[in-house]
Each structure stands twice: as structure tokens, then as C-alpha cells.
Amino acid sequence: MAEYDRSVYTEFLKQVPMLRSCSQDEIDHIADLGVVIEASEGQDIVRQGQAGNQFFVITTGAVGVSRNGELVASLGPGDYFGELALFDSSQRNATVTATSPTTLVSVSQGTFRELLGEVSSLRDALLEGMARRLHELEGRA
């Protein structure tokens, strides 16, 4: 299994908008669920149109995000994608491909839902964080 710096990962988790209302203990619970994934350059991590059930945080490396074959974003350490898949297994709206050797930490929907059942304060913090994020997005429209 690949190694990663857990303290850096927990700092990255704190920057995810829907997790900003979480306490350090709640962030630590989420970090405990993480599975380290190594992706080689050119490897697709998720594919547009496939069902999504994982959230990813990039700890090292870089990825390209493409929709309908067109590159729309580049992401690096601290960036994340797939957070809505923790709540809904809808189809992925983009393909994410490693553009260099990349290490990611992934949390699956099933494992995350188990945690929500165990830590009720986490559910409240997530709802608060998601509501705040929606207000931020509405302010931009």
C-alpha cells in the first residue's frame, strides 16, 4: 500500500467546503476511512458516465478533468473531486485522468454512510457545510 502524510491529508479535508463545519475529531473520523490509491500517468481514476460512489482527495501528483473529451480543469495536491458521490450514486459528469504519478485518498459512499450513522454530530456539520456552500454558489449566480 502506498504511503501518504496523514496530517497533510487531514488539513486537505478541512478545506473541503462541505467539511468546514466539522470538528477536528470528525475530520479524524473521516480520515480514518481513507484508502490510499496510486494512479500512474495516463490512468483514468473515474470515467464520465459511470456510476460514482467514491470521493477523492489528491495528496501528490496531478490530474486532468475532461467532459466530453475536452479538458476543463487541472487539479493537484489538496484538490478533491467526487464529493457528491458520498450522497448520491449518480453518473460521473467528467473523466479524471492522472497527468503524472498521483496519490489519492478515497472514501467510499458505503463507509461514509456508516460513519454518519455512528457520529450524529457529523451529519449536522455536513448539512451546515453544504448549506453554506449552496449560499456561496447562489451568491455567484
Image (tube, rainbow, N blue to C red):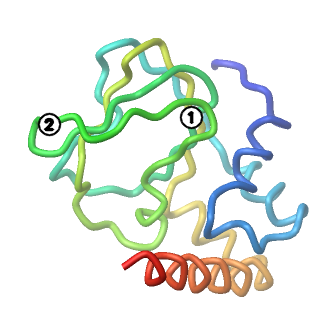
Name the residue type under label 1. Answer: Ile
Quadrant that contains the N terminus: top right
Q: Secondary structure at mark 1?
A: strand
Camera-nearest residue between 73 and 63: 73
User: Is 134 rendered above or below residue 23?
Assistant: below
Image height of 84 relative to 55, above or below: below
**Marks 1 and 2, the one that precedes in the sequence:** 1
**Distance of mark 1 from mark 2, alpha carbons?**
21 Å
Instruction: Report x, y in % for residue 118.
Output: 75, 77
Q: Which residue is identified by label 1? A: 58
Question: Dot 1 surroundings within 10 Å: few (below 14), some, or many (20 or more)?
Answer: many
Vertical position of residue 128 compared to residue 85: above or below: below
Say what amino acid the circle numbered 2 marks: Glu
- The answer to whether residue 78 is left or right of residue 94 is right
The percent coordinates of residue 73 (x first, y second) are 34, 39
In the rendered view, tell whether residue 32 sits above or below residue 46: below
Identify the residue at image location x=60%, y=23%: 60
**Quarter placement of the C terminus:** bottom left
The residue sitting at 54% across, 77% down in the picture is: 136
Q: Tell me which residue sits at (85%, 37%) in the image.
A: 7
